[in-house]
């Protein structure tokens, strides 16, 4: 009888968590500045990169203005760079808003991988709850080499390497386990750019208002940057740690990493303990 009651309680809890409503609000890692200006037969695009990392920009195909995206090209902006792209375009139709895609990284920069530290304070020990190519969620280009550490709500997260904070979301409060939560990213996380290697690292499922840094801050390896939580799509409190590199087609994609201890990420398996 006691076991049956316990099973019912667990089932009800799981059901409630999967039915949690997605937040109506949508927060962004950073704000990007993009304006167009038309004078006579010339169109100009004013671009401003607010981040301390390179970004690449391209236009989305515009049905009213054929070939506009090809004339614009694929532009890379350096850290904090402002620029103006101008070219001749007769009879530009202004009915459509110009849409664009901004992605992290310089596609021409060579990636020089180096060893990184674990994303938690020295002396701490945590269990791996999902490693590379996990069946649950680590099975796409953007997450296949991520590692989930079993940090609890309130535990401290540290930077795996020195670099700049280039993405930050900390205003979500809730979590869910349904497919809607899986398909809609509503988690708090930090993105850090490491200029010496060209790699980006991400720290996901932070607590509400759990960031200890601000956008643009420089952080050193091992510095406390956030408080672990349970936001977004997740079934249990944990830290989702992911190293990424920029690509043309898919933006940032997951990449393999090696830790200072000499342990390769691919060797860390579910239930392993690391410190």
Image (cartoon, rainbow, N blue to C red):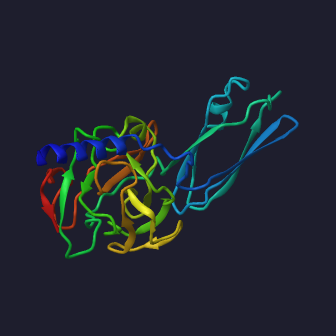
Q: Is residue 49 left or right of residue 119?
A: right
Q: Nearer the viewer, residue 143 or 66?
A: 143
The structure residue drawn at horizontal position 22% and vertical position 58%, both measured from the top left corner, is 258
- Can the viewer see residue 55 in this picture? yes
Q: Check the image and report above or below for 151 versus 134.
A: below
**Residue 160 x %, y %:** 32, 66
Q: Nearer the viewer, residue 216 or 226?
A: 226
Q: Where is residue 156, by image quadrant?
A: bottom left
Q: Nearer the viewer, residue 50 or 237?
A: 237
Q: Nearer the viewer, residue 132 or 189?
A: 189
| Residue at the far right in the pictured view | 40
Q: Is residue 127 left or right of residue 185?
A: left
The structure residue drawn at horizontal position 61% and vertical position 33%, both measured from the top left corner, is 60
**Residue 154 x %, y %:** 34, 69
Looking at the rendering, in which quadrant would you find the C terminus? Answer: bottom left
Q: Check the image and report above or below for 22 versus 126.
A: above
- Can the viewer see residue 142 in this picture? no
Q: Check the image and report above or below for 219 versus 105.
A: below
The structure residue drawn at horizontal position 56% and vertical position 57%, both measured from the top left corner, is 78
**Residue 221 x %, y %:** 34, 72
**Residue 272 x %, y %:** 12, 57
Q: Is residue 91 left or right of residue 178?
A: right
How many marks the image carries: the answer is 0
| Residue at the far front in the pictured view | 1
Looking at the rendering, in which quadrant would you find the N terminus? Answer: top left
The structure residue drawn at horizontal position 22% and vertical position 42%, both measured from the top left corner, is 8
């Amino acid at each position: 009888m006691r076991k049956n009651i316990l099973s019912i309680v667990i089932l009800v809890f799981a059901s409630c968590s999967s039915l949690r409503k997605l937040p109506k609000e949508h927060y962004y890692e950073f704000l990007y500045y993009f304006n167009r200006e038309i004078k006579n037969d010339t169109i100009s695009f004013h671009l401003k990169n607010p981040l301390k990392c390179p970004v690449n920009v391209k236009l989305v195909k515009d049905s009213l203005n054929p070939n506009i995206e090809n004339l614009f090209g694929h532009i890379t902006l350096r850290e904090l760079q402002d620029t103006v792209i101008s070219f001749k375009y007769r009879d530009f139709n202004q009915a459509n808003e110009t849409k664009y895609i901004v992605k992290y990284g310089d596609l021409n920069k060579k990636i020089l991988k180096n060893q990184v530290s674990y994303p938690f304070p020295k002396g701490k020990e945590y269990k791996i709850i999902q490693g590379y190519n996990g069946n649950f969620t680590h099975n796409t280009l953007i997450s296949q080499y991520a590692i989930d550490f079993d940090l609890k709500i309130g535990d401290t997260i540290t930077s795996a390497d020195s670099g700049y904070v280039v993405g930050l979301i900390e205003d979500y409060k809730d979590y869910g386990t349904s497919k809607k939560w899986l398909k809609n990213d509503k988690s708090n996380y930090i993105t850090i750019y490491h200029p010496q290697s060209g790699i980006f690292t991400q720290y996901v499922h932070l607590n509400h208002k759990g960031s200890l840094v601000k956008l643009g801050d420089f952080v050193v390896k091992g510095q406390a940057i956030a408080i672990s939580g349970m936001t977004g799509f997740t079934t249990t409190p944990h830290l989702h740690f992911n190293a990424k590199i920029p690509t043309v087609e898919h933006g940032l994609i997951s990449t393999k990493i090696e830790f200072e201890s000499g342990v390769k990420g691919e060797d860390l398996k579910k239930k392993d303990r690391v410190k």
